[in-house]
Amino acid sequence: MMQTIKKILVGVDLSDYSAETLRVAVEMADNLKVPLIVANVIHKRDVDAFNRLAEKSHYSLGEFLKHREEDRADRINKLIEEAGCDHVSITTLFRIGVPFQELIQMVHEEGVDLVVMGSKGRSDLAGVLFGSNAEKMFRHCPVPLLSVRSRTEKKRIDKR
């Protein structure tokens, strides 16, 4: 028996694949008439790197995080606008941490029934170095996960 989908979470890392991933998630949420959570995680390693350089910077960690979140919110809002989300209830969540761990935590906290994410992310190297976030999500996600491949990725595979 298939579980009813009542809420969808889409992981948006602002890579080249984010627009297409978000478009697929919006279309699914619209067709199913369910709310959509757009999730973005500021990687802990970026925060750690800032902390190591903080002595040489005039920004505080709080200012750095506020600036990052504001920039990401603007970029995500633009993607949402481009995806044509007029009929979908959308919530945007930002977290700091290890992306796959934070996404799984959001699944539990928000009562998500389906996760949508790109098969590749910011590095464009799916699984090359210690496994990608998508790979880790497939291994640990407690709900179904839909992996969206980009059109350019599909074309490269088709040419082989």
Image: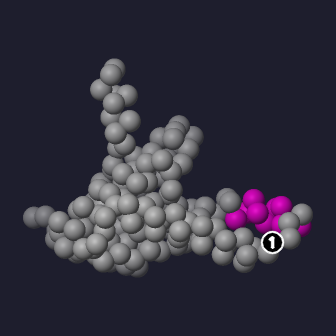
User: Compared with residue 15, is residue 35 higher up or lower down, i.e. above or below?
Assistant: below
Report whether 134 appears left or right of 5: right
* Residue beneath the point at 60% across and 71% down: 69
Residue 13, image x, y percentages: 50, 57
Q: Is residue 50 visible?
A: yes
Residue 69: say if magenta.
no
Report whether 103 appears left or right of 56: left
In which quadrant of the rendered image does the N terminus lie? bottom left
Q: Quick one: which residue is furthest to the right in this view?
A: 56
* Residue beneath the point at 51% across and 56% down: 14
Residue 34, image x, y percentages: 23, 74
Q: Amino acid at mark 1?
A: Tyr
Q: Toward which corner of the image does residue 11 lie, by quadrant? A: bottom left
Residue 54: say if magenta.
yes
Residue range highlighted in magenta:
47-55
Looking at the magenta stretch, what is its main secondary structure? helix
Q: Nearer the viewer, residue 136 or 38?
A: 38
Residue at mark 1: 59
Q: Toward which corner of the image does residue 26 lie, by quadrant? A: bottom left
User: Compared with residue 137, is residue 8 higher up or lower down, i.e. above or below?
Assistant: below
Residue 21, image x, y percentages: 36, 54
Q: Nearer the viewer, residue 3 or 69?
A: 69
* Residue beneath the point at 56% across and 66% down: 72
Label 1 packing within 10 angstroms: few (<14), some (14-19), many (20+) = few
User: Compared with residue 126, is residue 26 higher up or lower down, i.e. above or below?
Assistant: below
In which quadrant of the rendered image does the C terminus lie? top left
All told, the count of numbered labels is 1
User: Compared with residue 126, is residue 63 higher up or lower down, i.e. above or below?
Assistant: below
Helix, strand or loop status at disc 1: loop
Q: Is residue 107 visible?
A: no
